[in-house]
């Protein structure tokens, strides 16, 4: 995997073999960190025409519901407009982080939630 970006709250890679961007969110998130990282992800999608993302929240440690509305109503529509076709979202085992993710997840055929990275990866690889 090729590392594209590293910050305190996220590491972003590209899996060339399987054709998806891997976003590994780390630790406590807040609205500012999510919006900043979200813009970085959107830029990669636009610049590189990425269509698949594995969004890994397994290391997220708390709630971030203050960014949920922005994620759902602004970021996802922008991502889809930029060409996103498949978004595999692996939820955190932290109940507050999971509730924030569920609140942020718009109803869309593009986005599917998972409890394990392997299941999410398998689904992404199956998508054409």
Image (cartoon, rainbow, N blue to C red):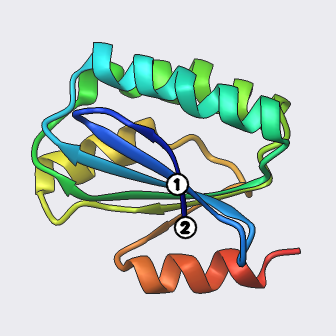
Indicate the quadrant containing the N terminus: top left, top right, bottom left or bottom right: bottom right
Q: Position of residue 24 (x, y in %)?
A: 37, 54
Marks 2 and 1, the one that precedes in the sequence: 2
User: Pointer 2 and pointer 1: residues touching (CB < 8 Å)?
Assistant: yes
Q: Residues within 10 Å of mark 2 (few under 14, many from 20)?
A: few
Above or below: residue 45 compared with residue 123: above
- Give the Cα separation between the discs numbered 2 and 1: 6 Å
Tell me what residue is drawn at x 23 percent, y 60 percent: 92
Which residue occupies the extreme top position in the image?
Answer: 32
Callout 2: SS:
loop
Disc 1 on helix, strand or loop? strand
23 horizontally vs 65: left or right: right
Question: Residue at point 30% right, 21% down?
Answer: 33
Q: Residue at x 35, y 76 (%)?
A: 115
Against 15, residue 70 (above or below) is: above
- In the rendered structure, the answer to whether residue 38 lies left or right of residue 49 reads left
Q: Is residue 42 left or right of residue 56?
A: right
Give how far across and how far down residue 105 sits, in percent.
Answer: 49, 43
Mark 1 nearby-residue class (10 Å; few <14, some 14–19, many ≥20): some
Q: Report the residue marked by disc 1.
A: 13
Count of picture labels: 2
Q: Which mark is residue 119?
A: none
Whether residue 3 is visible, yes or no, is yes
Q: Position of residue 39 (x, y in %)?
A: 55, 21
Q: In which quadrant of the rendered image does the C terminus lie?
A: bottom right
Hey, which quadrant is residue 95 in on the image?
bottom left
Please state the horizontal and vertical placement of residue 73, each as a whole percent of the image. 58, 22
The numbered mark at residue 1 is 2
Does residue 69 appear anywhere in the picture?
no
Q: Is residue 109 above or below residue 33?
A: below
């Amino acid at each position: 995997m090729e590392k594209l970006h590293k910050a305190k709250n996220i590491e972003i890679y590209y899996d060339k073999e399987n054709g998806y961007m891997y976003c590994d969110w780390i630790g406590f998130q807040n609205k500012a960190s999510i919006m900043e990282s979200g813009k970085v992800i959107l830029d990669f999608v636009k610049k590189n025409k990425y269509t698949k993302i594995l969004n890994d929240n397994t290391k997220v440690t708390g709630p971030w519901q203050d960014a949920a509305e922005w994620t759902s109503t602004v970021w996802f529509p922008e991502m889809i407009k930029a060409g996103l076709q498949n978004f595999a979202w692996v939820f955190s085992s932290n109940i507050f982080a999971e509730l924030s993710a569920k609140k942020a997840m718009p109803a869309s055929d593009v986005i599917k939630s998972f409890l394990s990275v392997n299941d999410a990866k398998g689904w992404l690889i199956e998508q054409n």
